[in-house]
Image: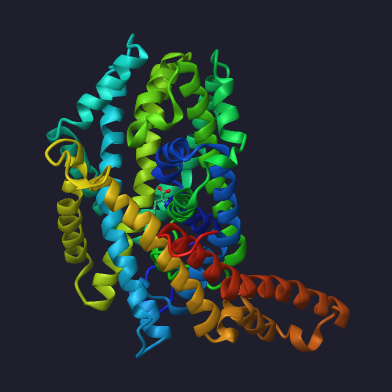
Amino acid sequence: MALGSEGRDGFTSRFGIVCAAAGSAIGLGNIWRFPYVVGESGGGAFLLIYLAFVLMLGIPVMLSEFVIGRKAKRNAYGAFRKIAPGTWWPLVGVIGIVAAFVILAFYSTIAGWTLHYVYLSVANSFKGLGALEVTSVFEAFQTSGGLPLMWQMIFILLTAVIVLSGVKKGIEKYSKILMPFLVLLLISLSVRAITLPGSMGGLHFLFNPDFSKINAAVILGALGQAFFSLSIGMGALITYASYFPDRTNLSATSFQVSIADVLIAILAGVAIFPAMFALGMQPEEGGPGLIFMVLPNVFQAMPGGYLVAVAFFVLLAIAALTSSISIMEVVVAFLSEELNIKRKSATLITVIASAFVGMFCTLSWSTFEGVGIGDRNIFDLLDFTASNVLLPLGGLLIVVFVGWYMKQQAVRDELTNMGVLKLVVFMIGWYTKDERTEEDRARFRAIRIRIYAVFMFIVRFIAPIAIAIIFLNAIGLIRI
Ligand code: PFF
């Protein structure tokens, strides 16, 4: 057992920490959700706004979650209860746990589709099919009811098995080795896609901003996509950071994870849009089935396409797993630490509850077709509520908590690892025998404090105000 205190399980290696946090962030959000949301939201201008949100809002929220989690060493709910006892702040944890349930429900639908596509590619089912037939294969599967439901349940069970095997052995082991392979595959898919005849329009669509496509709903969508993709706003990273050792550099980790996350999303975009244009599809056409309708065509046009297809869907399923374990862990850690339920029973409860809600999502295109609000079915409604409402709301409260409620010294200590640094300095007797000059030390402190000041300014003012404006604007209360 590593440095996690109070007998809790913990992460061992530095690489393991970044990988596990990256494993949570990188998943279906980048490869499945990003392309179809960009497609529906008009391309390049959406991408720019999304990037700005990741930088200005996403990284600070992620860092805030790290600060809360490592400080409290508790689950998403318990962390607030520990730092702010007797207040209503633990409600933020409750919002997170609700969001985790909702996300697990619809995430497992898409992950189930991915598993089915592993099966289809192993069986070489796309061989010789044209673009229209590939689309029909997907639609027949999506609307078939039982089959997607079966795959969804398999996926939820797989997630539970990993969650049950414990934090260190489970998460660290699985997320370490595999993601670089997924990146390599995405690069090769992108190269193939942009060398297809007629593909250039796709790059143009993705990288050439057309601001006439932007409205309040699109802006909220970009915020939701940024939060969903970074795994922030619901305490998944509070929970993960509660297992971080004291020496982890929180700000560096948040930057590395966010940048990796964004790059993979863009790579997915570069693989999808050129291929769509080459196939003569319209970017807004795909919906949640987009990658499943487009990518089999790209695989077919590649040398070794059979193997690439199998490897791609296997790795995508694994990327989905490393994300879904972080979602399930939010609920399981809460049930076991706060309600004193054994981890095994906590996992079982979570599996049953999420399978129940998840069923409605998966059957949105069959049994429950036509049930919904406006043009959104059950799946869309849950996705919208979690990504565009609960996560930004959670994120808003998280930055306000760190910016205005927490003791500033505590935030500073977490952010600069100063608490530990002082202890180390004290222990090896440097403090008195320091050979560095005063000037060196001042510079050392100044760098740390500058990062701290920028962070504090964002979490106190910029992030809360920006998220609030985006919300109010989207529901029409204000107009910008
Ligand atoms: N970030 C994950 C993805 O992009 O697939 C999804 C996710 C995981 C969202 C964990 C929220 C979360 F707390």
Task: From the top left corner, tell me how far across and down residue 392 is, in percent.
Answer: 43, 62
Q: Quadrant of the C terminus?
A: bottom right
Q: Name the residue at 38% across, 68% down.
A: 9
Q: Quadrant of the N terminus?
A: bottom left
- Residue 3 visible, this orientation: no
Q: How is the image coloured?
A: rainbow
Q: Name the residue at 33% across, 8% down.
A: 128
Residue 101 drawn above or below residue 185: below
**Left or right: 228, with 264 as reference point:** left
Give the number of callouts: 0
Task: From the top left corner, tell me how far across and down residue 124 is, in percent.
Answer: 30, 17
Residue 243 drawn above or below residue 293: below
**Left or right: 467, with 394 as reference point:** right
Task: From the top left corner, tell me how far across and down residue 275 is, in percent.
Answer: 48, 22
Residue at the farthest top position: 128
Q: Name the residue at 55% across, 39% down.
A: 266
Residue 52 drawn above or below residue 122: below
**Left or right: 158, with 201 as reference point:** left
Q: Name the residue at 60% across, 69% down.
A: 462
- Residue 182 visible, this orientation: yes
Foreground: 165 or 133?
133
Task: From the top left corner, tell me how far across and down residue 236 is, in percent.
Answer: 39, 62
